Image (cartoon, rainbow, N blue to C red):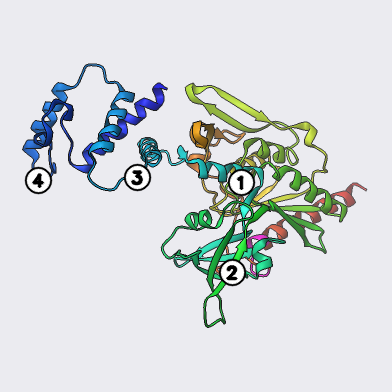
């Protein structure tokens, strides 16, 4: 309780200075005479009034009571329109956490926490469409397989104009996602601009539970039998889907593998350790430095060695973060594969999620992690062994220069390996 209350007070003090005015003790009967208006316009009066307030401050600050008093004063005296009580409290908490200067320590209201938990479970309630943005416009990157969006006729490239009757111009992509998602069985209306259509196209879509496909895979090069697995997130379903993809590619005669972590924002730490254990024979996957300097290490899980070790190339880019960097960094330090692409995002901090009453939660940075070799990812990022900038065109197979380079690297490794076998024989 003490940690929470101390944070509340810091917000109240900051709020007073930013707004440029404050009340003296209203309960003293001073009334409007105690009002100080604009520190910029009346610096001498502000200084005098602040000194007066400081002089009246009790020796022991009682944060909870202070916040409660300010909240009560707002309720009874504030002239303009104000948010409801829950929103005021949420703003207070967010303002407090912002004072830490750590963008990863954050408060999640019940809706945001629910969304995060759905993503970690690997499913969500919505229409089943990936969104992207370009030049300030939000469009459908692709409708997911067997999704309500696909069944309704939504197509890749459709530019979203309105959700229900609310225009999305100027919104961030996260805001649009929030409007589209909703309870299973409810309806949402999408108005889109479609190339070749003179008028906007309107879809009324019934939301459903969408099982998100975390893993996509294929045989990227048939002649060399080089497999390809794209891992989009480290959630609860990622390890099982990854294992199934690996097993299927092995049944097709896979000789080497490209693991694509581009755009993967991270996720659950234990899933990253499990997947790393498939490519690293032994040793640490990640070193964790906790508050107070205590160091822990998470090692390879030997029981995960169900698959043959093969030549490996890992693709990363500037959006490969957190658990992606743990996995790529471990593979690089153990020399278990070749890292190809561009520098990673650089998030070497660990957050612990703490559920709160009322369905909300707070994510607090509780540790930092290092690669097995001791590199601080938050400072150095993961730098590829082979740097390849992406092509200007969309990342499609025929234009994906990073994927082409990874395949080239693996073909060389397979050729070298086969040559060594012939020499031995």
Asked which secondary structure carries label 1, the reply is helix
Spatial CA distance of label 3 from label 1 is 29 Å
Q: Is residue 5 magenta?
A: no
Spatial CA distance of label 2 from label 1 is 25 Å
Residue at 15%, 31% (x, y): give it.
24
Percent x, y of residue 79: 22, 45
Percent x, y of residue 39: 13, 41
Mark nearer the viewer, 3 or 1: 3
Mark nearer the viewer, 2 or 1: 2
Graded by Cα atoms within 10 Å as few (under 14), some (14 to 19) or many (20 or more), the crowding at tag 4 reads few
Asked which secondary structure carries label 4, the reply is loop
Percent x, y of residue 337: 70, 46
Residue occupied by mark 1: 119
Spatial CA distance of label 1 from label 4 is 50 Å
Q: Is residue 401 magenta?
A: yes
The numbered dot on residue 203 is: 2
């Amino acid at each position: 309780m003490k940690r929470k209350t101390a944070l509340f007070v810091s917000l109240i003090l900051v709020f007073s200075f930013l707004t440029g005015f404050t009340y003296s003790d209203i309960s003293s009967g001073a009334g409007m005479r105690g009002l100080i208006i604009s520190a910029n316009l009346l610096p001498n009066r502000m200084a005098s009034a602040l000194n007066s307030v400081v002089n009246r401050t009790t020796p022991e600050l009682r944060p909870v009571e202070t916040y409660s008093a300010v909240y009560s004063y707002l309720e009874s005296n504030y002239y303009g329109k104000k948010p409801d009580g829950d929103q005021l409290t949420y703003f207070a908490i967010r303002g407090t956490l912002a004072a830490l200067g750590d963008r990863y320590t954050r408060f999640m209201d019940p809706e945001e926490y629910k969304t995060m938990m759905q993503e970690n479970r690997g499913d969500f309630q919505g229409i089943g469409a990936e969104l992207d943005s370009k030049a300030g416009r939000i469009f459908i990157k692709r409708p997911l397989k067997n999704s309500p969006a696909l069944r309704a006729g939504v197509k890749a490239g459709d530019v979203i104009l309105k959700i229900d009757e609310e225009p999305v111009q100027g919104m961030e992509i996260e805001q649009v996602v929030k409007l589209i998602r909703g309870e299973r069985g409810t309806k949402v209306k999408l108005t889109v601009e479609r190339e070749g259509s003179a008028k906007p196209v309107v879809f009324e879509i019934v939301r459903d539970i969408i099982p998100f496909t975390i893993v996509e895979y294929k045989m990227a090069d048939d002649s060399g039998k080089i497999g390809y697995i794209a891992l989009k997130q480290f959630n609860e379903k990622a390890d099982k889907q990854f294992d199934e993809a690996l097993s299927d590619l092995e049944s097709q005669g896979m000789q080497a593998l490209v693991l694509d972590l581009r755009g993967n924002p991270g996720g659950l730490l234990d899933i990253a350790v499990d997947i790393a254990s498939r490519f690293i024979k032994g040793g640490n996957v990640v070193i964790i430095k906790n508050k107070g300097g205590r160091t822990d290490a998470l090692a390879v899980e030997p029981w995960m060695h169900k698959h043959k070790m093969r030549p490996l190339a890992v693709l990363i880019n500037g959006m490969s973060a957190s658990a992606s960097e743990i996995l790529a960094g471990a593979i690089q330090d153990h020399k278990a594969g070749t890292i190809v692409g561009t520098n990673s995002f650089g998030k070497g901090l660990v957050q612990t999620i703490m559920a709160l009453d009322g369905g909300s939660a707070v994510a607090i940075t509780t540790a930092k992690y290092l690669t097995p070799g001791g590199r601080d990812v938050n400072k150095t990022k993961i730098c590829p062994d082979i740097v390849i900038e992406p092509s200007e065109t969309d990342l499609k197979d025929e234009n994906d220069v990073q994927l082409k380079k990874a395949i080239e690297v693996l073909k060389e490794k397979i050729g070298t390996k086969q040559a060594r076998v012939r020499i031995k024989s």
